[in-house]
Amino acid sequence: MSRSREFVVFSLVSAFSAAALTLWQTLLPLYLDDLGFAAWQIGVGVSLTFNLTFLLAFPSGYLVDRLGWRRSAFLALLLSLAAPLALMFVKSFEEFLLVPVLAGLSSALFTQSSVKVLVRSGTKRRGLFYSSYILLSNIGRIAASYISGFIALLYSYQVLYTCSALSVIPAIWLLTRGFKGSGAIEESARVSAWKVVKMYLKDMRLKILVLTLFLHDFAVFIAIPYLALYAKYVIGADEVGVSLLSGTSSFTQMLFQLGSGWLTDKIGGSLTLAMHFIGISAIYVAYSQVTSFLVALALYAAMGLIITLDLPARRFLITKYAPEEYVGAINGFADSIVGIGTMLSAAIGGYLWSISPSLPIFAGGILNLSTLPFIFYLKYRKTRLKAEKKGGHMLGICAEKYRTG
């Protein structure tokens, strides 16, 4: 099987997995609220669900480099099947903590596998290629987001979680059948965890990038767990309304994802991330003042567009800086550091919510602007190094002409 087709099969598998996770994650804040969880417990629970994937990214990237992406993806599918089944029996916050671990490890394995498959594809248009993968995943998320509210409202959350588990089965079938008889053997790398850390510490570009992403994710995850609760308590949306907001964001992501990948290839990862940071800050500040559902729907649509700029640019820069044999582990190491910031966000968001429902969203948008000096410096550093290299090259040509003249 060609490596390009390998990437397509993986992307289709990811689409089913994304749909399965989105079915129960879309309404998770409302479900935890119905269970009687405190605001801080909802914030921590939602933040863990979405961000343990970052904390587990380094061991997951290490595992992908050791086992290969196919075995890792198969393990991820089993975990994403188990997560909603476990959620059905949750009665307390302590019992709930198993669910983020299952979902986080599943997402982490898929994320690091996607980077591995992207590098193996050998394409130079990595931004566009990665956007194609995200596009297929978003198709699954769109369908799941739109129907999740209807299933929960017309039937029950238990039926919703059962549907989520069943959605994983086509992905398992596709993963096992997609490579049957291909004869392709995926080599496992001998990866040194200590060497990964040393490579990261020696590369100034990686350190600046990770610091920037740390600040970004720290800021936005002050707000993210409370977006759905704000829609419920301030805007007045029910489960169907929240699922429509989420689905609209996913729909606009699908529309613009390929264009964002093309843009990343055109202008580079640094400027694309800067556009993402500015856009997210503007939308969060605006959303924190909204009381109309239609205005909120328009902001979610705009948010979908802005979100498409994020991951292609991140992966573009990581795969550009890291060697192929270590790209999974280095990407995972970077994601793990970024994930630490998101864990700190949950407590801050819960405290701000207790003061005012709009405050965590507004604060997240403002704090996110702290990323701009670092991402612009990364762009400036690249431009300066290119100019110095070009100047040295021209100086060498002039010297050669002088000697031969």
Image: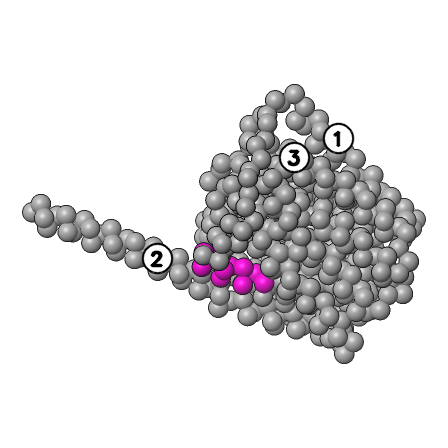
Question: On the rendered structure, is 17 left or right of 131?
Answer: right
Q: Are marks 2 and 1 in contact (CB under 8 Å)?
A: no
Residue 245, numbered label: none
Mark 1, residues whose alpha carbon is within 10 Å: few (<14), some, or many (≥20)? few
Q: Nearer the viewer, mark 3 or mark 2?
A: 3
Query: Closer to the camera, 181 or 372?
Result: 181
Question: On the rendered structure, is 88 left or right of 260?
Answer: right
Q: Which residue is mark 3?
A: 70
Q: Which amino acid, mark 3?
A: Arg
**Residue 359 in picture, x, y percent from top left:** 71, 75
**Residue 35 in picture, x, y percent from top left:** 90, 61
Q: CA distance from mark 2 to mark 1?
A: 49 Å
> Where does the magenta region start and end?
203-214
**Residue at image x 48%, y 58%?**
201
Magenta span main SS? helix
Q: Which amino acid, mark 1?
A: Trp
Task: Identify the mark nearer the N-term, 2 or 1.
Answer: 1
Asked which secondary structure carries label 3, the reply is helix
Q: Which amino acid, mark 2?
A: Leu
Q: Are marks 3 and 1 in contact (CB under 8 Å)?
A: no
Task: Identify the mark nearer the N-term, 3 or 1.
Answer: 3
Q: CA distance from mark 3 to mark 1?
A: 13 Å
Looking at the image, can residue 147 be seen?
A: no
Q: Which residue is mark 1?
A: 173
Q: Which residue is mark 2?
A: 385
Query: Closer to the camera, 297 or 102?
Result: 102
Residue 19 part of the magenta-drawn span: no
**Residue at image x 77%, y 40%?**
78
The quarter of the picture where the N terminus appears is top right
